[in-house]
Image (cartoon, rainbow, N blue to C red):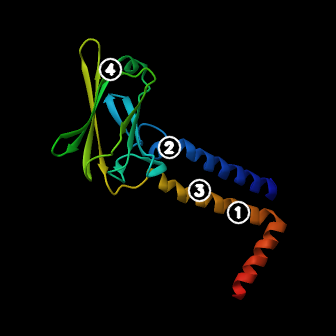
Amino acid sequence: MNIKNLYRQSAFALLGLFFSSAVLAHGGATGTDTDQCKFELEKDHWIHYTAYQPKAYPAEEFCGNIPDTDSLIQLVFDYQDQRYRNMSVEFEVTKEPEGTRVFYQEPKKHKSGTVVLNLPNGVPEPGKYLIHITLLQDSGERLDAHMGFKAGGGQPTSKGSMGLYALVIFAGLYILYLSNAGFKRKVDELLGKAKEF
């Protein structure tokens, strides 16, 4: 294998790594074992949860920490198990530890498997909140699940991927530097001029 092929394969591997980061949405999880933005309804049956603050942080996703309290909060739930799509789902958000209700949606069926809840004014104050989800079967059986989040002072989950992007870009430029004589000459000239200052 010659050196050009090695560089080319390395570049493709880095590009694959770069584009695969899109697969790492929802907190960087590729499966239910490591995904922190999910909670279990029944054994091996999960709901995935993502929070957004589209006015304050239009391009960010959140999970357990939501930065602002007074901006629109969108809670998005995805359940892929087909049988849940035929059940009515009730949602409630409470302030903890008091248990004060800050949001409620009556039971409804969501055939698409995706539910978007809007808390138009956010939540009343910083602190801990609990999402209560109840799935109601026609037989009257109830499945309850809970997931907590903290509002005020959180960090976007997607910020961590910025370091990965920077690393991939740097690695790609380094490979280009090593494999392209013209690019190497230009970089060396710029570095030489920078040393003069």
Task: Say whether marks 2 and 1 touch (CB < 8 Å).
Answer: no
- Mark-to-mark CA distance, 1 and 3: 12 Å
Q: Identify the amino acid type marked 1.
A: Leu
Q: What amino acid is labelled 2 in the image?
A: Ala
What is the x, y in percent for residue 95? 22, 44
Task: Please tell me which of labels 4 and 1 falls first in the chain.
Answer: 4
Reading the image, the residue beneath label 1 is: 173
Q: Is residue 189 left or right of residue 57?
A: right
- Which of the 4 image quarters holds residue 81? top left
How many numbered marks does the figure carry?
4
The residue indicated by pointer 4 is 88
Instruction: Give residue 25's mark.
Output: 2
| Nearer to me, 154 or 10 | 154
Residue 108 at x, y percent in the picture: 33, 21
Q: Residues within 10 Å of mark 3 (few under 14, many from 20)?
A: some
User: Considering only order in the chain, which callout, 4 or 3, is on the residue closer to the N terminus?
Assistant: 4
